[in-house]
Amino acid sequence: MSKTYYDPADLRKFSKITEWSEELGNKFFEYYGKVFEEGALTAREKSLIALAVAHTEQCPYCIDAYTKDTLQRGVTKDEMMEAIHVGAAIKSGATLVHGVQMMNKVNKLDG
Amino acid sequence: MTKVKTQSLQKKGSDLAQSNKQLEILSNGIFQNGELPTFKAKISETSQFPLKAKKLEILQINVGYMCNQVCDHCHVDAGPDRKEIMTRDTMRLCLDVIKNSGAHTLDLTGGAPEMNPDFRWFVEEAAKVGIKDFIVRSNLTIIRANKKYYDLPEFFKKHNVHVVSSMPHWTKGKTDKQRGDGVFAKSIKALQELNAVGYGMPDSDLKLDLVYNPSGAFLPGDQAAMEKDFKKALMEDFNIQFHNLFAITNLPIARFLDFLIASENYEDYMYQLVDAYNPAAVENVMCTNTLSISWDGYLFDCDFNQMLELPVNSKSKHISEFNEELLEGRNIVISQHCYGCTAGAGSSCQGVVA
């Protein structure tokens, strides 16, 4: 039994989730594949969005997968780091904007 | 941070300069313990073993391993310290084959083929044969390396040579990281000079194609999408035009294998190649219509097999005893490096194959 929660080799086994629920698993992978197809956004743009979200979700599998995916698409280190800062800005903004709720409550409770 | 790249594995005395050592690595470990299927087992699943040579279409001649660059992932382990150079006598034998074979494409490679002292003589003689597509694989920087090479764009034009050049990225950082300090600036200048004499222009017959191979342990992205990005960036930033981009997968041999092992990426990379295996790519893999000729005149199924010293499985083993009939239908010699040509959309010296 692994002594850590995450094993990088598990990423290769992702498709095995269909073994315990074939219909839902297949539907998920079909949907997933469709989402990342070239559309109104290019596959490259989608890959950068995925990289940023992988970080905000703090999913190590997704970070590995989309770091490699963006590199494959010729994305530069600068672009990758900028994308992550977009994710980080939204995360911190989402924390700080709740400060207004705190301020409202203070004003109500304490004048 | 980029670094000055100076020595081949051979010059460094590295174990991996030996082809048998490379083949041992490719046969042992994850392929020996059954974790991953061997290439033979994989193509057998779709009854594609043994892989057979079809009609010869492309003659690829390696005129020597000497190069002015020492790129990180070079499968030739080329560099300024490599002394293997094709002689004019061997070139004469090649010319006889070019004249008499049914091949429609002649593809000169190296090293930097231009560094062979008989390169220009060979090009002049080969051009007279009137082969349909005459390719020279130029690393671009050679055009700016020394005054004696400055006229290469005009020389290529005079003989209607199809220029195919390596360009790992449209940014300086990624290019210099893989190919050495200053390579990007020289490559850009060389491309502008090729454009200036008419190479790569939209309606020009002077063909200029670029080769992209990844800078690290990952596979190339979609060739068409990469071409679009390259064209946009090179035009916007440097006013450079070219015709096609070939996306080529790095094969796990020589310096790239050395990098994979040193960076602990070897197993993961082999998994990537096997996971991306595409039986449709096997159908059109380049070894089935190509012959690779080494600097000393020996015949191989491809340039990679040449570097692994895996000669053709035929009685016709040398250019001096070239026999197209004997060579057609031969069994292609394979090992696990072949997964590099069958991953995704496939990979060949002309880019994707499926």
Image (tube, rainbow, N blue to C red):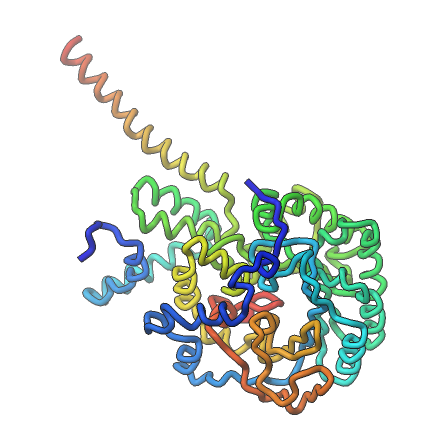
| Coordinates of residue A57 in the picture (x, y in percent) | 30, 42
When asked about the image quadrant of residue B76, the answer is bottom right
**Which residue is located at x 38 percent, y 47 percent?**
A50
* Left or right relative to B341: residue B186: right
Displayed quadrant of residue B227: bottom right
Residue A13 falls left or right of residue A109: right
Is A93 in front, or is B125? B125
Quadrant including the N terminus of chain B: top right
Which sits in the foreground, A1 or B136? A1
Whether residue B283 is visible to the viewer of this picture, yes or no, is yes
At 67% from the left and 78% from the top, the residue drawn is: B298
At horizontal 32% and vertical 51% (from top left) the residue drawn is A61
Closer to the camera in the image, B342 or B92? B92
Residue A91, image x, y percentages: 32, 33
Q: Against B139, is B321 above or below?
A: below
| A97 up-or-down from B210: above or below | above
